[in-house]
Image (tube, rainbow, N blue to C red):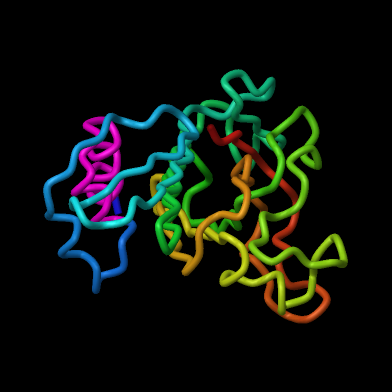
Amino acid sequence: MARVMDRVRTALAAGTVGALAALVLPPASASASTATATATAPPPSASMSVSTSASAQPWRVEVLHAAGAFTSDGAGGAFTYDTSAVPAGAGVGVLSVSGPTRTRTFLALSGLQPDRAYGAHLHSQPCGALPADAGGHYQQVLDPVQPSTDPDYADPGNEVWLDLHTDAQGAGWSSSTNPWTYRTPPRSLVLHAMSTQTGPGQAGTAGARLACITLH
């Protein structure tokens, strides 16, 4: 997972379309990523249009990211609401690459409680001083009943779930792949107290909101 994150960071920093396309294009289209193309590195929360050949239609890639350390006052956009579960200074990095046909999201954490399960999801609003400020989960198809606990809507196919289990040093990594591109960008990553539930009436719930980082 760390190697994947390194490769993503390198592709974004260099604006290398071939490397970026290898991450977001379906495997059957991977050969297109080797065609000649150029682009500049996208700014934060940018949509980038590129073409991998002279005859290909341009496709769009949206890049969301955040990295920093959790603090009680949310300096830098990363809040901890429970310093026993997410100590101040714990590190977090999130990267989500959406387009042209799918969305891949990566999460890396350090400095958490060792050997513990955490729930994690992308949320619809930016973080704030209160845990509830991040709103509900991002849903590709919005459940008309909110808060959403219907497994037809609150599931990892319609939302972005990044649950993980930390190692003996309190570090953890996770990733998700969804077969769609964002209808509107999610705004934050929220870390929860337990693994995400899937049953009717509790689907999508994962206990208290422990921490949050705003995406850019």
Residue 89 visible here: yes
Given residues 57 and 195, the one toward you in this image is: 57
Q: Position of residue 141 (x, y in %)?
A: 69, 66
Q: Residue at x 34, y 50 (%)?
A: 58
Residue 204 magenta: no
Res 74 quadrant in image: top right
Q: Residue at x 69, y 34 (%)?
A: 127
Position of the N terminus by quadrant: bottom left
Q: Position of residue 63 (x, y in %)?
A: 44, 41
Q: Position of residue 17 (x, y in %)?
A: 23, 44
Note whether 117 is above or below 72 in the view shown: below
Residue 6 magenta: yes
- Magenta portion: prevailing SS class: helix
Res 198 quadrant in image: bottom right
Q: Position of residue 51 (x, y in %)?
A: 27, 48
The stretch in magenta equals 2-23
Given residues 6 and 59, the one toward you in this image is: 59
